[in-house]
Image (cartoon, rainbow, N blue to C red):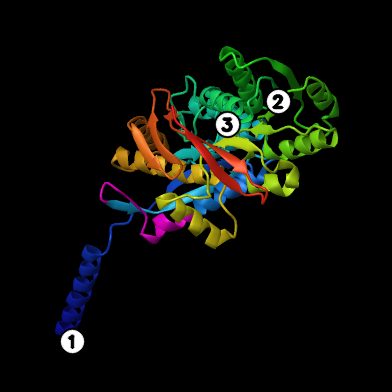
């Protein structure tokens, strides 16, 4: 009996050892990454699109048994928190992700209004942050722990100015913007400075409003009276829809020019044909995409029934950049602070990245140098590639 048991025990031990040798190496703990997203508030579509893209990426990695780092596979865990599209909430979310969830890095916020203050919090707490969509220079300025996947407004502003002057034959421009939004205010000022420095003509009206304003008739009356050749609106899509419709109601028949915050299907849903045949600068165009970009779009559409906007694609690229940084770290530290430092060093070591929104080279500030595209809103409400502009 003892002999039979010994044989059985040896066989069991042999099977266990064989399984351990043949199976992929797994870590006990997941790599935890935080997402600081606007799931409610003024721009919930942005948070929703980013989360959907993140869920696709998460499924891909974990279906392979996790992310391999230093010969061991670690499952990824994504922690999503809602910043309510508010600056103060974005700061609170960043602190919760850092102090309560012990994440090793944070993706988001998207909008500069939330990304600028949250970036300060992440930098102060020595936690890597990558913003997918924020274009305001202050988000990363003098913050070695903060990075981004999007181009900057000092590049976007001149792109808008040059395109509008060429496309519309414009000599006079006008601007209306949300003065409480870092993104809108910063881009409006950069555009005005660029337009004037290029000698393209006067900015005949430069009107501001508050975030919660619904009636823009006073500002638009001033703008229309100045007879601009086009109106630049560097605002979030929900405000753009109201402004464009009210301008049309007041008799304005000229073109509008927008920026990357226009780039969501919700703009057309809210604005209707009032926004047709206008243009905006952005990060990529879904229509006519090829290669890995088209593959991402096709998968997203099949899974969710919607075409991914630029913030979804940029979230995908932001995760890809972070994954490369984790691999650069070479190992996974159990201490979150040590791992955050290793990830930050891994991010700083990335000199270029080929993503679905284009190829980037990173400067010392952690900002990508990459191309922009100008998109036309067709009379069917589709976003169609018009031209590409590179640094």
Q: Which residue is mark 1?
A: 1
Which mark's residue is nearer the viewer, 2 or 3?
2
Q: Quadrant of residue 59?
A: bottom left
**Horizontal and vertical percent for residue 220?**
81, 27
Q: Which residue is mark 3?
A: 115
Label 2 Cα neighbours within 10 Å, binned few <14 / some 14-19 / many ≥20: many
Which residue is drawn at the image coordinates 43% and 30% (left, top)?
A: 368
Q: Earlier in the sequence, mark 2 or mark 1?
A: 1
- Element assignment for label 2: loop
Q: CA distance from mark 2 to mark 1?
A: 98 Å
**Horizontal and vertical percent for residue 138?**
54, 22
Which residue is drawn at the image coordinates 63% and 42% (left, top)?
A: 38
Q: Earlier in the sequence, mark 3 or mark 1?
A: 1
User: Which residue is situated farthest in the left direction here?
Assistant: 3
Q: Quadrant of residue 36?
A: top right
Label 3 Cα neighbours within 10 Å, binned few <14 / some 14-19 / many ≥20: many
Which residue is drawn at the image coordinates 51% and 30% (left, top)?
A: 122
Depth check, front residue: 334 or 376: 376
**Whether residue 333 is visible:** no
Which mark's residue is nearer the viewer, 2 or 1?
2
Q: Give the number of the disc on residue 290.
A: none
**Residues drawn in magenta:** 56-71
Which mark's residue is nearer the viewer, 3 or 1?
3
Q: CA distance from mark 3 to mark 1?
A: 70 Å
Q: Which residue is mark 2?
A: 229
Which residue is drawn at the image coordinates 37% and 33% (left, top)?
A: 347
- Element assignment for label 3: helix
27 falls in the magenta region? no
């Amino acid at each position: 009996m003892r002999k039979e048991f010994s044989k059985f025990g040896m066989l069991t031990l042999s099977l266990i050892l064989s399984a351990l040798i043949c199976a992929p190496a797994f870590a006990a703990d997941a790599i935890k990454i935080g997402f600081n997203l606007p799931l409610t508030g003024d721009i919930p579509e942005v948070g929703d699109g980013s989360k959907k893209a993140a869920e696709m990426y998460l499924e891909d990695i974990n279906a392979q048994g996790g992310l391999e780092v230093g010969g061991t596979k670690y499952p990824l865990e994504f922690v999503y928190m809602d910043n309510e599209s508010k600056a103060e909430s974005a700061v609170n979310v960043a602190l919760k992700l850092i102090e309560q969830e012990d994440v090793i890095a944070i993706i988001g916020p998207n909008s500069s209004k939330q990304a600028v203050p949250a970036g300060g919090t992440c930098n102060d707490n020595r936690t890597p942050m990558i913003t997918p969509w924020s274009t305001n220079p202050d988000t990363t300025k003098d913050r070695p722990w903060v990075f981004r996947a999007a181009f900057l407004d000092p590049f976007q502003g001149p792109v808008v100015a040059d395109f509008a002057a060429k496309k519309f034959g414009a000599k006079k421009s006008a601007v209306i913007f949300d003065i409480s939004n870092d993104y809108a205010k910063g881009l409006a000022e950069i555009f005005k400075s660029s337009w004037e420095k290029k000698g393209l003509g006067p900015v005949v009206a430069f009107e501001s409003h508050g975030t919660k304003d619904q009636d823009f008739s006073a500002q638009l009356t001033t703008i229309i009276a100045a007879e601009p050749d086009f109106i630049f609106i560097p605002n979030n899509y929900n405000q753009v829809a109201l402004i464009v419709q009210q301008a049309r109601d007041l008799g304005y028949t000229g073109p509008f020019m927008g920026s990357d915050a226009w780039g969501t299907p919700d703009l057309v849903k809210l604005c209707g044909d009032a926004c047709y045949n206008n243009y905006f600068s952005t990060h990529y165009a879904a229509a006519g995409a090829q290669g890995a970009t088209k593959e991402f779009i096709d998968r997203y559409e099949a899974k969710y029934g919607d075409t991914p906007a630029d913030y979804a694609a940029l979230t995908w690229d932001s995760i890809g950049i972070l994954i490369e940084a984790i691999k650069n770290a070479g190992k996974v530290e159990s201490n979150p602070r040590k791992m955050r430092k290793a990830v930050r060093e891994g991010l700083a070591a990335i000199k270029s990245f080929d993503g679905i929104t284009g190829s980037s080279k990173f400067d010392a500030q952690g900002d990508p140098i990459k191309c922009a595209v100008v998109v036309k809103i067709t009379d069917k409400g589709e976003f169609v590639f018009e031209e590409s502009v590179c640094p």
